[in-house]
Image: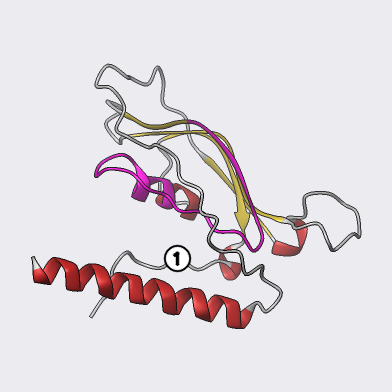
Amino acid sequence: EFNGIASFMAGLDRLFLFMKAIQKLDPDRPKDDAKVMMKDMSPPDEDDRPSSQHVIRVKEVRASDLAVNASTDRTQPSTILTMRDVRLVTPDNKRVLVENLDISLLRGRNLLIAGVSGSGKSSLLRAIAGLWSNGSGEIVRPSSDQIYFLPQRPYC
């Protein structure tokens, strides 16, 4: 029991330090990070079978090109990640992990992806990174030189 609690606390500590580093690098970032968005991502029913396999399109764009609108109004936050009608399926096409996902993440905002084991959280991040193509939909994200993916646990 103690090891589990210690591991959980170490993870919280890493998240806190990571958030502090982000705030230091982006002083204009809103400080209202208490607003966290969660979505029920429970595993789909076993009867959910994809009708056909498509490929998820990942479009990389420069962060400066990801503005919500073309106006020069800098008070409006820009979109840094967009997912349109994203559907993720397992490599064997037997289970749908995520379906009809439409989301736009604004600069300076947080997104917490939560769900039970096997619900597709890591697969969704792999799709955003361009490492998972089983499914359909479109993902628009910053180019590879402007985005950084961290592992769930540090490698020692």
Lateral position of residue 149 relative to residue 93, left or right: right
Few, some or many residues within 10 Å of mark 1 (<14, 14–19, 20+) = few
Lateral position of residue 69 relative to residue 78, left or right: right
Q: Nearer the viewer, residue 73 or 146?
A: 73
Lateral position of residue 156 relative to residue 136, left or right: left
Classify residue 43 by image quadrant: top left
| Helix, strand or loop at mark 1 | loop
- In the picture, the quarter occupied by the C terminus is bottom left
x and y, in percent, of residue 120 in the image: 34, 42
Question: Can residue 7 be seen in this snapshot?
Answer: yes
Q: Is residue 118 magenta?
A: yes
Q: Which residues are magenta?
A: 100-125
Q: Tell me the residue at 62%/69% (across/down).
A: 31
Q: Nearer the viewer, residue 36 or 147?
A: 36
Name the residue type under label 1.
Answer: Phe
Residue farthest to the left, as pictured: 1
Q: Nearer the viewer, residue 41 or 129?
A: 41
Q: Tell me the residue at 49%/73% (across/down).
A: 19
Image height of 66 relative to 13, above or below: above
For disc 1, the marked residue is 149
Q: Nearer the viewer, residue 104 or 50?
A: 104
Image height of 151 relative to 104, above or below: below
Q: Is residue 111 magenta?
A: yes
